[in-house]
Amino acid sequence: MRKKFITLIAAILIANLFIVTAVADTGGLGNEIIISPMYTYISNAEALLSINSSGKAKPEVYVTGNSAVTSIKASIFLQQYKNGSWTTIKIWNESSNSNILNFIDTYDVSKGYEYRVRATVTAYSGQKSESTTLTSSLVKY
């Protein structure tokens, strides 16, 4: 009995390690709840993807740091879902010497696949930094 009790307590303690607290903001939108991560230096970060009827993909990454941010770096990956996995088909490495990074480019893609943009962004404030990974919505073409 004692062994079962100790196992139960250990399981409860381990489960508590995986609990994540989210900040919810209804923003006056009724029942819709928006959950936003809380950052120290990054004020806003977003990855977007659109593809026009000619197969021209338009990846976009926007990052805004707070007033303490002196530079931002981003590695941006255009990915194609093929044969059951995501494959990176184009990489951009971008940087900004301010607290704003705006990236827009185009790249021709093949028909019959799903695509997404993933970006790893880092905001720097002196010797300190903060990083996050962004993922756009999936786009079928």
Image (cartoon, helix red, strand yellow):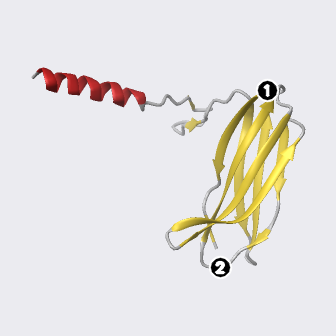
- From the top left corner, tell me how far across and down residue 135 is, in percent: 63, 52
The residue that label 2 is drawn on is 111
Q: Residue at x 74, y 29 (%)?
A: 41
Q: Quadrant of residue 106?
A: bottom right
Whichever of labels 2 and 1 marks the residue nearer the N terminus, that label is 2
- Secondary element under disc 2, as helix, strand or loop, is loop
Q: Is residue 60 left or right of residue 14?
A: right
| Residue 12 rendering spot, x and y as whole percentages | 30, 26
Please name the amino acid that badge 2 sits on.
Lys
The quadrant of the picture occupied by the N terminus is top left
Reply above or below: 34 against 127.
below
In this orientation, which residue lies closer to the viewer: 72 or 43?
A: 72
Residue at (41, 28) in percent of width and height: 17
**Where is residue 84 drawn, in percent x and y?**
49, 69
Rendered view: 81 above or below 103: below
Give the class, few, some or many, for how many residues have Cα within 10 Å of label 1's Cα (few <14, many ≥20): few
Residue at the extreme right of the image, as rendered = 97
Mark count: 2
Rounded to the nearest angstrom, the CA distance separating label 2 from label 1 is: 45 Å
Amino acid type at circle 1 is Gln
Image quarter (top left, top right, bottom left or bottom right) of the C terminus: bottom right
Residue projecting furthest to the top: 2
Q: Secondary structure at mark 1?
A: loop
Q: Which sits in the foreground, 122 or 112?
A: 122
Q: Is residue 5 left or right of residue 83?
A: left
Residue 22 point in image, percent of width and height: 52, 31
Q: Bin the neighbour count of mark 2 within 10 Å (Cα to Cα): few under 14, some 14-19, many 20 and up.
A: few
The disc label shown at residue 93, or none:
none
Residue 92: quarter of image = bottom right
Residue 127: assigned label = 1
